[in-house]
Amino acid sequence: MTGALAAEWIKLRSVRSTCHVLAVVAAVLPLVALMAWNGATGWDSGTPEERAAWERAQPLEEAVLPFVQLCAAVLGIMAITSEYATGTIRASLTAVPSRRTALAAKAGAVAAVSLAMGLVAVFAMHGIARLVIGGRPLADYDEPFSDAVPLLLSSGVSVAVVALVGLGVGTALRSTAGALVVVCGLLFVLPVVPAFLPSPWGERLAGVTVSDLAVQSAGGADDPLLPPLAACAVMAAYVGIALGSGAALLLRRDQ
Amino acid sequence: MTTAPGITAGRVLAAEWLKLRTLRSAFWTSAAAAVLIGLAALLAWYAVGVWDGLTPEQRKSFALSPLADVTAWAVSLCMAVLGVTAATSEYRSGTIRATCVAVPRRGLVLAAKAGVVGAVGLAVGQVAAFGAFLASSAIIGDRPIDGQDLVLADQAPHLLATGLSVAVFAVLGMALGVLLRSTAGAVVVVVLLWHVLPMLAANLPAPWDARVGSVMLSGLADQIADGSDTPSIYGELLAPPAALALLLAYAVVPLAAAAVAAGRRDV
């Protein structure tokens, strides 16, 4: 298993898309600083109504989170579909004949990188926004840092969840484009559907979307569908179902 | 002795059509579009079921957004991915070399590819917009549900513009595929333009939310021909001709950039 993990680590860090994804996420940080600066100057020169609008604004790390999740999805998907595109998968499975071990090692490497990327990105964005905004009461940035930590942690973990879902879907579909469409459906299309569903199904569906689960598992939701632990369990179920279906197909088919 | 057949626009178009229709993702993205129309019908059917069980008092606070818009919005991602794969599949498999040997003029290849991808995008987009509209209006019937303006004559311009924007997404995806030569890279840029940037724009405080939102590709159809009384979630600052020009620019500018890039580099 250690050997398989080391192999997956080498493959993940030498795939070009991994560097691109990390570079793009890093490039978002100055952008966040710019948005925070825009908010700070807007608040300083704003009328009372404008100030009220700024105070209600979404925290920047939450606004940018879907983009980081999309990058993580690409990371997870490309970890496996690049092998199918180039044919490396045949060499990989010759070297590690146990397909369960191969996929588990890949999941380990993807989880480690995406979790680190998610946590660093979310905490860095929050820190940058906090520094630039200073003590101004924009988007709750004047609240103590400790209040923000649970949501920052669960947001960072949700990035890893999306990466692992991408890995599972990529393993099942063996196609970069197909897997990206499926993950975009989960991340972006599914959260729009509840607006068209009358209650109670609208609330129920909205409560199990990835972005909502991150808020609920931090205990920060106003009217939660699920208690924090259950929300964590549903997030784990996303990973379990995606990786499980990927593993089931990987075990059954010829490559 | 017969002369070798010349390269004509018609033949290049036929070749591109053959390649597109034998692409697996063309089947899957079109199938996804069909499923999405079915889902729109299912949503309408569920909403009607709920509406019928409500008291007149409760019905006043019941609203349903237009289903054609959201269907076309989701279909536009599928068609953009179709456009991306129409270009990147050639780079992945190496067919691009055979293509460029067969038709040395790269501008012609690109124009034919854009023509074929745009035509499929337009057809699927119009079918999605009108299909979802007709399905939901057949299911909702004459129930006066708030947010549902189901007179075809009123809605036709809006539906046409919505279907056209799906075609623009397809051509944009194809141009990005040629520019980036990477499926993942091009799809990420498409998703950014399609939903992530509009979502970020909507979170900007006024007046920047409307200013940035108005130039987002997903919101242009609403500004070309408005479909409902409810304000657009994107922004409504552009006059219809300006919105139409911008919509076309979203296809033409990336295509021109792709033509320049393809003309300069080695395959």
Image (tube, helix red, strand yellow):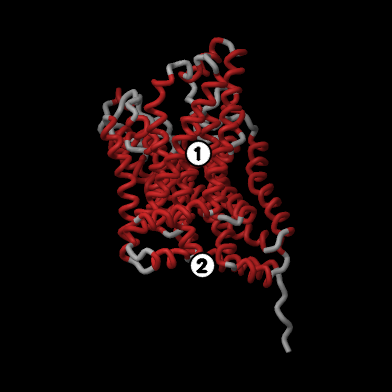
Q: Which residue sits furthest top?
A: A48
Quadrant of the image for the C terminus of chain A?
bottom left
**Residues flagged by tags 1 and 2 on a common chain:** no
What x and y, as percent, mark residue B53?
Answer: 25, 32
What x and y, as percent, mark residue A122?
Answer: 47, 32
Residue A129 visible: yes
Q: Is residue A62 left or right of residue B254?
A: left
Query: In the picture shown, does residue B135 fall above or below B148?
Result: below
Q: Residue at x 44, y 41 (%)?
A: A188
The CA distance from mark 1 to mark 2 is 33 Å
Residue A207 location, quadrant = top left
Between A119 and A192, the residue placed more toward the observer is: A119
Q: Which residue sits furthest front?
A: A2
- Label 2, residues with CA under 10 Å away: few <14, some 14-19, many ≥20: few
Between B263 and B71, the residue placed more toward the observer is: B263
Between A192 and A226, the residue placed more toward the observer is: A226
Q: How many marks?
A: 2
Disc 1 residue type? Phe
The residue under label 2 is B22
> Mark on residue A196?
none
**Disc 2 chain ID:** B
Query: In the picture shown, does residue A221 fall above or below A85?
Result: above
Question: Which of label 1 and label 2 is nearer to you?
Answer: 1
Q: Residue at x 59, y 62 (%)?
A: B91
Quadrant of the image for the N terminus of chain A?
bottom left
Q: Circle 2 sits in a helix, a strand or a loop, which is it?
A: loop
Residue B33 visible: no
- Label 1, residues with CA under 10 Å away: few <14, some 14-19, many ≥20: many
What x and y, as percent, mark residue B223?
Answer: 59, 35
**Disc 1 chain ID:** A
Q: Residue at x 61, y 69 (%)?
A: B15
The residue under label 1 is A67
